[in-house]
Amino acid sequence: MRKCILSSLQIVMVAGLIWRAAQAQQLAAPPQPAFGAASIRPSHLTPGCFSMLPPGGSQYELTCVPLRILIQMAYKLNYIDGGDGAVDAYYDLRATAADGSPLTPDSVRPMMQQLLNERFHLKVHPGKRELSGYGLFVSKNGPKLHAVAADSVTQGQKAGEPSQNFISSGRVQGRGVTLSGLAGLLALVEHTPVVDHTGLSGTFNVDLTYAPDSSTDTDLPSFFTALEEQLGLRLKPEKVSVDTLVIDHVDETPTSN
């Protein structure tokens, strides 16, 4: 068998080719979206200091928000592991779009990731966690849902315009939501994960009204009763596997703006 023996010169040439290929691949990769300008500073905490400028304009602002929430928004995940006390510090964020174009939740997300990487040297990887939660099922009498076309709801959000999908005391509203999206809204009500097991596809308009837990003088049904009577759905306790974001590293304080 012939042995292939490379000379020192050949080794240097091969290494050079590998380096140039890696450089070309790096240059070909599209740049990570970033804000045109952004500042993030520790908050001066006062009662009721939280505020948020809704997406839709070229400016994006959040005040009195924990770093944990910024990370959740950036990666669209509700559960975070790690980070110790660093993720519980509060910050004010002010940013603008690089080209003056309207900012939407989807366009802000990668920009937020880039900002957190630059200012906090945030390093993360995906994970899983088992939690007590609920499965969402169709009740025995069948669903009572109002189906709508997927394009019936205008995507995006104008500056100052409230979201069409929200929860408030005794109310859940969804416009053009899937059952998975509805499960996400119900999870916010119960403060625990909810997984869709209905098997129903399509998009729906949802209006759910119920008696808040603190209410003592109302004719409205309880949350679980309203869910079955008004939407034909029910929640069943179960162990839920949820996606998590595991923090490998995060600085305690951001770099200067």
Image (cartoon, grey):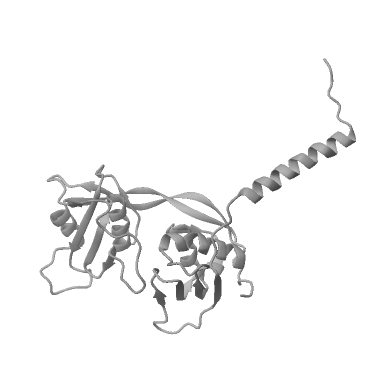
The quadrant of the rendering that contains the C terminus is bottom right
The quadrant of the rendering that contains the N terminus is top right
User: Could you tell me residue 50's position as x and y percent?
Assistant: 41, 78
What is the residue that sits farthest to the right in this orientation? 8
Taking the spot 12% from the left edge, 72% from the top edge, the residue there is 218
Task: Report the front residue among 97 and 181.
Answer: 97
What is the residue that sits farthest to the top in this orientation? 1
171, above or below 141, in the image: below
Taking the spot 19% from the left edge, 73% from the top edge, the residue there is 215
User: Could you tell me residue 135's position as x and y percent?
Assistant: 29, 48
On screen, residue 218 versus residue 182, left or right, reads left
Query: Image quarter for residue 48?
Result: bottom left
User: Could you tell me residue 238's position as x and y percent?
Assistant: 32, 48
Taking the spot 30% from the left edge, 70% from the top edge, the residue there is 162
Q: How many marks?
A: 0
Residue 248 in sight: yes
On screen, residue 107 versus residue 37, left or right, reads left
On screen, residue 29 versus residue 213, left or right, reads right
User: Could you tell me residue 239's position as x and y percent?
Assistant: 35, 48
Taking the spot 43% from the left edge, 66% from the top edge, the residue there is 103
Task: Report the front residue among 142 and 147.
Answer: 147
What is the residue that sits farthest to the left in this orientation? 219
Task: Report the front residue among 61 and 128.
Answer: 61
Residue 72 in sight: no
